[in-house]
Image: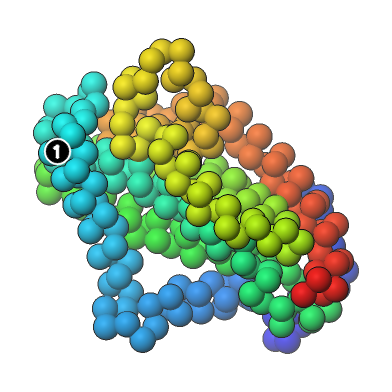
Amino acid sequence: MQKELLGSTNTRYRADPLYIPGSIVEHRFVISQLAKRAILGRYRGTVLGLLWSLVTPLLLLAVYTFVFGTILQVRWVSQSGGNAEFAAILFSGMLVHGILAECLTQASTLIVSNPQYVKKVVFPLEALPWVTVISAFFQGAISTGILLIYLFFVQGSIPWTAVLFPIPLFVLAFVCIAVGWLISATAVYLKDIAQMMGLLSTVLFFMAPILYPKTALPVEFQSLLYLNPLTFIIEQFRAVVLWGETPNWSGLSLYGIASVAIAWMSLAWFQKTRKGFADVL
């Protein structure tokens, strides 16, 4: 078991494309154990425990819906169900943003806060970002369940295309792991990264069609929203879950290829810079 926990020494510096999924497969034991600890540890000692993973998004949903749906009267062109439909539109965008935002904020301290793992020569450090990704997607899965239940009670049915919701989120996972490898490695040498991630998360939130429809912007500025990696995924997630549309397969394919390429470069950066982690820490 110790060998499985620490990983094999002949693969810990691999940076080939196959090692992107291979890293989670090879080190699945340590990843599963640390992910379980991270999920349970987040709410350990609290009165509500894991229920906070339900309460938090519901409270945010209520606040944003009241402010933007009732006070500011923000509406989507396709919206016809009043504040109930707006709540679902808003919540779906918050859900996707929350996944990437957690990966961003956690990555900045991932290596710095775990020097005990850095000092273990055979510990698979490249597995640590996967722990953050799994934890973020666990919360995303709970939020998706809340959204589907909400749609059923409000609309009386759920589009059959909702079964396809894992597809855009699966593509987003490559962006998340790329962020994990890139940010966690860079933050070891550049401590300012940790201060920047909260700001970056906020910028990504307001520069994506979460609180407002894309059409609220002048036509010449709408394309700029696609510089945000969340925009396309939010649109695809809403398409399959809310509006009963099939995914944009060609768009998701191109997005996936680009995400894998970025993840590959991020993994290479992580493996190259990890040799100096122990000296810095």
Is residue 143 visible to the viewer in this orientation of the structure?
A: yes
Give the percent coordinates (x, y) of residue 226.
Answer: 51, 27
Q: Which element carries disc 1, helix, strand or loop?
A: helix
Give the percent coordinates (x, y) of residue 16.
Answer: 81, 50
Give the percent coordinates (x, y) of residue 105.
Answer: 53, 59
- The residue carrying mark 1 is 71
Residue at 16%, 32% (x, y): give it: 73
Seen in the picture, residue 7 relative to 56 is either above or below; the reply is below
Residue at 19%, 52% (x, y): give it: 62
The quarter of the rendered structure image containing the N terminus is: bottom right
Who is closer to the viewer here, 128 or 249? 128
Who is closer to the viewer here, 135 or 165? 135
144 with respect to 227 (left or right):
left
Disc 1 crowd, CA 10 A, few/some/many (<14, 14-19, 20+): few
Quarter of the image for residue 145 reads bottom left
Residue at 70%, 41% (x, y): give it: 262
